[in-house]
Image (cartoon, rainbow, N blue to C red):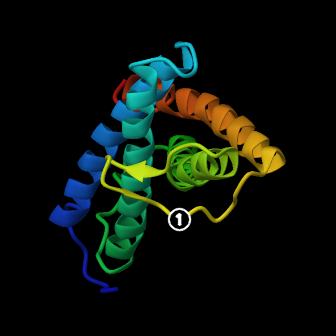
Amino acid sequence: MTTETTSAYDPLLRWIHWATAILFILAMLIGFYCGQQQPGTSPRRELLEVHKSLGVTLLLLAILRLAVRATTTAPAEPSFIGRWVRLAARLNHGALYFVLFAMPVTGYLFSSAGGYSLKYFWTFSWPRLVVNNPAIAHIGQTSHDLLAYLVYAVVTCISPRRSGMFS
């Protein structure tokens, strides 16, 4: 990591950020829609394959994002942002990182232990590290569902107007 200052994030990091944001919103919308549909029906089954594949892709992007962030310099925070807004932004940012890792892991546990498909965009199947374990499947499903509510709360709290940042 260098000590020089910069006025913007690394271009690769910005690309990862926007790809993550778009894929995250898409996965969230698909997951919400599928949650409203009857289990075992079409297009729910097919959309869940996309949802799971997006989740794995997001996990891989999160790992890449941390690696790039660890090797690049971040711009300084704007001086006009108050201490409480800065703290709230950091907490929200931390919650988003937590969710980027926890959602795919809990979804994987739910699918793997529950005996559901683990195909990546209909190409290959991920290995099952947990097989036929209803208790772990239930924990994975419950955790995944609870984290979804956290996502809805965190995403609705990032509006600059709500934070007073641009008032």
* Residue located at (42% from left, 18% from top): 42
Locate the N terminus by quadrant.
Answer: bottom left
* Residue located at (34% from left, 32% from top): 26
Report the front residue among 13 and 161.
13
Vertical placement of residue 29 versus 56, above or below: above
Vertical placement of residue 103 versus 73, above or below: above
* Residue located at (25% from left, 46% from top): 18
Locate the C terminus by quadrant.
Answer: top left
Would you name the residue on which mark 1 appears?
127
Spot occupied by residue 20 in the image (x, y as percentages of width and height): 32, 48
Spot occupied by residue 100 in the image (x, y as percentages of width and height): 49, 51
Residue, far right: 135
Q: Is residue 159 visible?
A: no
* Residue located at (28% from left, 38% from top): 22
Residue 28, picture quadrant: top left
Residue 50, picture quadrant: top left
Vertical placement of residue 145 versus 161, above or below: below
Instruction: Tell me: 12 left or right of 138.
Output: left
Q: Amino acid at mark 1?
A: Pro
Spot occupied by residue 49 in the image (x, y as percentages of width and height): 41, 38
